[in-house]
Image (tube, grey):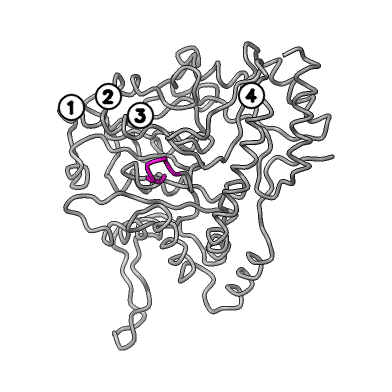
Amino acid sequence: MKIPFSPPDIGQEEINAVVKTMESSWITTGPQTEKLSQMIAARCHTEYAACMNSATACLEMALRLLGISNGDEVIVPAYTYTASASVIDHVGAKPVIVDIEPGTFHIDYDEVGRAVTEKTKAVIPVDLGGLMCDYDKLHEIAESKRGMFHANSELQDAFGRIVITADGAHSLLAQRDDGKCSGELADFTSFSLHAVKNITTAEGGALTWRSIAGHDGAAIKKTLMLLACHGQDRAFKPDGEKPFWEYDVEFLGYKHNMTDILASIGVVQLERADQIMEKRRSIFKRYDEAFKNMGGIRTLDHFTPLGSSCHLYMINLVGRDEIARNTFMDKMMESGVATNVHYKPLPLHTAYKKLGFDISDYPNAYNMYSTEVTLPSYSKMTDDEVEYVIKCVKQVYNEMGL
């Protein structure tokens, strides 16, 4: 049996939706993009959402909206994909990388508190694997540091504290036991709609935000969409408004808009969201049950009150190292099961080494990475495929004496 790592769950409904959009008079940013934005906002319990061409674009536009730039600092965990940190550099600010909590994949909250300076404008926590961070703790930290915060934009002044701009690339559809959803807990939350995510548009992203005192949500959305489309207001005016062709470029923006072709996929995906999530949860529960008495394997608890989207099923080989981890993955591949690693900590990459970061300063991130393996989990996975992955894990586990 051959088990791929994470193929997209695309069916005839999505195909039909794309064809319908292709046959319409509007294939770039238009009614389907707006419909998807409204659906995501409703799902996340927010008033508005803005769809763009990637989660990276969403996160960067949030920083630009806030006016974060040269001389500012933004805190980010060492254990994440580069997009979480590269956007900080893109806007001219300084990434301040902190370690993760021992034995978890979440940012170390105590380290966040210690890393705050008078230059700190935001923190980017990461919901790795779909398991949400403790946003109550993060808000407590932000509130406790109000006296150190110096706003340099009108929007920053409205917050009066460090802004929590979450990387929720993995956590769309996650919900806490108290009913609060990913997307309504941080000040801003960026979601990925990439091909391997629970909900996909092939490529794409969405940004949600909480209400901000003194600032109209519709105006914030307009500014975000201007940022994502060259700063240009719409070229075509309502019927009767002259001249109909006239437009303006309000500022020098960027090119990050989502197309209706891609949005039409996401609309159908969100209509199937409950079905998709039910399947993913069932896979995670079967893995949990299968591995619970295997002492050499540590699993995450995705069913805690914090909530999870059950995006990545990540395990650690207890007491082992990179060599053993790689051997484990090789043996799984020999059995036909594709696995992956999420992620190499930022300081292991050349780009971050050049910025002066050293992995020795992030022992918790390195320890988690060196023994981490991500198992296949996707909503089209059959019961037989799940059982085969479990069988292979146990077989390799016994062969290696884990």
Label drawn at residue 292: 4
Q: Position of residue 245 (x, y in %)?
A: 36, 80
* Inter-mark Cα distance, 4 to 1: 45 Å
Q: Position of residue 139 (x, y in %)?
A: 28, 34
Name which residue type carries label 2: Val
Q: Which residue is mark 1?
A: 148
Q: Residues within 10 Å of mark 2 (few under 14, many from 20)?
A: many
The magenta stretch spans residue 113: no
Name the quadrant containing residue 288: top right
Residue, far bottom: 240
Q: Secondary structure at mark 4?
A: loop
Q: Residues within 10 Å of mark 4 (few under 14, many from 20)?
A: few
Q: Which residue does the image show at 76% across and 12% down from the upper left?
A: 401
From this view, report whether residue 15 is shown above or below residue 310. below
Q: Which residue does the image show at 33% across and 77% down from the upper left?
A: 246
* Inter-mark Cα distance, 2 to 1: 8 Å
From this view, report whether residue 115 is shown above or below residue 203. above
- Which stretch is magenta? 175-182
- Asked if the residues shown at circle 2 and circle 1 are in contact, with their CB atoms under 8 angstroms apart, the answer is yes
Label drawn at residue 75: 3
Main secondary-structure element of the magenta-colored stretch? loop
Q: Nearer the viewer, residue 277 or 194?
A: 277
Q: Secondary structure at mark 2?
A: loop
Label drawn at residue 116: 2
Name which residue type carries label 4: Lys
* Inter-mark Cα distance, 2 to 3: 8 Å
* Inter-mark Cα distance, 4 to 3: 35 Å
Label drawn at residue 296: none
Q: Position of residue 25 (x, y in %)?
A: 53, 79
- Asked if the residues shown at circle 1 and circle 3 are in contact, with their CB atoms under 8 angstroms apart, the answer is no
Q: Nearer the viewer, residue 160 or 252?
A: 160
